[in-house]
């Protein structure tokens, strides 16, 4: 077959060379045909044999989790370094996001606001009790123990700031131990107030030997709370908490958290605090109906019921979460339980001091005793 006349060829065709009187032509716009049974694998995918008859045929499989490929028809995917994670298309590795309860988080602002608000309320109640130190309602049920309880509640509200922000070694050491000791002092104070109610009602006869036991309740705070101190000290000496970088819980994130070190000592601390709360609740429940003036046993019962309910509900929520949400659950439990104790025990007294001052007098108490 002879080639067409040169005059009829399009301008894009040019003579290549002449051999044996026959002119060859180059067709630059025509590509060499390729034989393919599937499309090429895009970046982010790798070639995978499909088990067919032709070895040139394959499937395109997406790269596995944590792997990338950045070339077409890649044979393998490359794993990202531990500090990095693939982008959405699995084409390149990006630095992982660090996760902790940062001060830029709205949740931290809420917790901080509540902690500062209730701390201010606690300071106000403390100042009110100091001003009315010699009035009957402040004297009722041991004013010294009441003041110790207020101080422990105030410091418990502030101790949540150890849980906020970027964890470091010192905050990991202080957050659980400070919370444990302060809560133990607070619950021991509640137990001492309950014992005071019980002894005060039993010691109604003049010259009763039980009157001397009222002062014993002051030592209950020291003796019960002092048990928590060696637990925490041993914990810090044997297996102290430390900062941990968790690369595996959430893909694409590095969780910066405090590892408690020893679960045994951590749960020993919680168990002792729970034991104190349970004993306080049982004793307050037993004496809640005693007809004493300004009897706060029923308020102690409500406060310990709320305290125990919060921490019992917190345990499964705490164990089922990770990262910053685990910390948020514990902070919520601390704030709620402290606010419950503060409200149930002290708000009725504040109500009488500020709004019903006529009830805060010795004459009213004497009339109730005569009735």
Image (tube, helix red, strand yellow):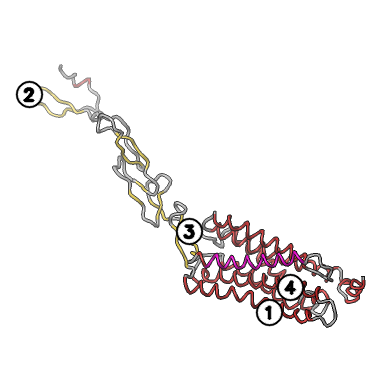
Q: Quadrant of residue 332?
A: bottom right
Number of the label disc, if any, that sits on residue 195:
4
Number of the label disc, if any, that sits on residue 255:
3
Q: Which residue is mark 1?
A: 219
SS of the residue at dot 2?
Answer: loop
Q: Are marks 3 and 4 in contact (CB under 8 Å)?
A: no
Q: Can you tell which of label 1 and label 2 is closer to the viewer?
A: 1
Q: Can you tell which of label 3 and label 2 is closer to the viewer?
A: 3
Q: Are marks 3 and 2 in contact (CB under 8 Å)?
A: no
* Residue at x 55%, y 75% (from the top left corner): 230
C-alpha distance separating marks 4 and 1: 11 Å
Q: Can you tell which of label 3 and label 1 is closer to the viewer?
A: 1
C-alpha distance separating marks 2 and 4: 123 Å
Left or right of residue 93, residue 73 in this image: left
Q: Earlier in the sequence, mark 1 or mark 2?
A: 2
Question: Residue 264 placed where, x, y %?
Answer: 51, 65
User: Compared to 307, does 184 lie above or below?
Assistant: below
Camera-nearest residue between 301 and 26: 301
| Segment colored magenta | 265-286
Number of the label disc, if any, that sits on residue 107:
none
Camera-nearest residue between 95 and 289: 289
Q: Can you tell which of label 3 and label 4 is closer to the viewer?
A: 4
Q: Are marks 2 and 4 in contact (CB under 8 Å)?
A: no
């Amino acid at each position: 077959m002879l080639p067409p006349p040169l005059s009829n060829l399009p301008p894009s065709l040019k003579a290549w060379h002449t051999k044996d009187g026959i002119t060859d032509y180059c067709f630059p716009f025509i590509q060499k045909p390729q034989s393919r049974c599937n499309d090429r694998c895009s970046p982010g995918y790798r070639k995978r044999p499909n088990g067919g008859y032709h070895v040139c045929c394959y499937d395109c499989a997406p790269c596995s989790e944590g792997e990338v490929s950045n070339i077409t028809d890649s044979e393998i995917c490359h794993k990202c370094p531990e500090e990095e994670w693939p982008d959405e298309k699995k084409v390149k590795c990006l630095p992982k996001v660090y996760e902790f309860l940062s001060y830029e988080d709205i949740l931290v602002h809420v917790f901080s606001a509540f902690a500062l608000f209730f701390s201010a309320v606690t300071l106000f109640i403390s100042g009110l009790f100091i001003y009315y130190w010699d009035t009957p309602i402040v004297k009722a049920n041991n004013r010294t123990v009441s003041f110790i309880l207020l101080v422990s509640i105030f410091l418990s509200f502030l101790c949540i700031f150890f849980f906020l922000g970027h964890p470091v070694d010192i905050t990991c050491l202080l957050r659980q131990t400070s919370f444990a000791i302060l809560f133990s002092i607070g619950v021991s104070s509640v137990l001492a107030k309950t014992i005071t109610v019980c002894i005060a009602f039993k010691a109604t006869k003049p010259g009763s030997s039980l009157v001397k036991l009222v002062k014993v309740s002051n030592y209950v705070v020291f003796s019960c709370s002092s048990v928590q101190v060696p637990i925490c000290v041993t914990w810090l000496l044997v297996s102290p908490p430390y900062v941990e970088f968790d690369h595996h819980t959430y893909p694409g994130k590095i969780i910066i958290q405090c590892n408690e070190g020893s679960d045994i000592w951590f749960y020993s601390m919680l168990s002792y605090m729970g034991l104190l709360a349970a004993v306080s609740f049982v004793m307050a429940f037993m004496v809640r109906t005693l007809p004493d003036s300004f009897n706060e046993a029923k308020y102690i019962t409500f406060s310990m019921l709320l305290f125990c309910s919060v921490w019992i509900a917190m345990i499964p929520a705490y164990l089922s979460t990770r990262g910053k949400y685990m910390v948020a659950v514990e902070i919520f439990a601390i704030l709620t339980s402290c606010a419950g104790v503060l409200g149930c025990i002290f708000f009725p007294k504040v109500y009488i001091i500020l709004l019903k001052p006529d009830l805060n007098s010795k004459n009213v108490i004497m009339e109730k005793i005569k009735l």
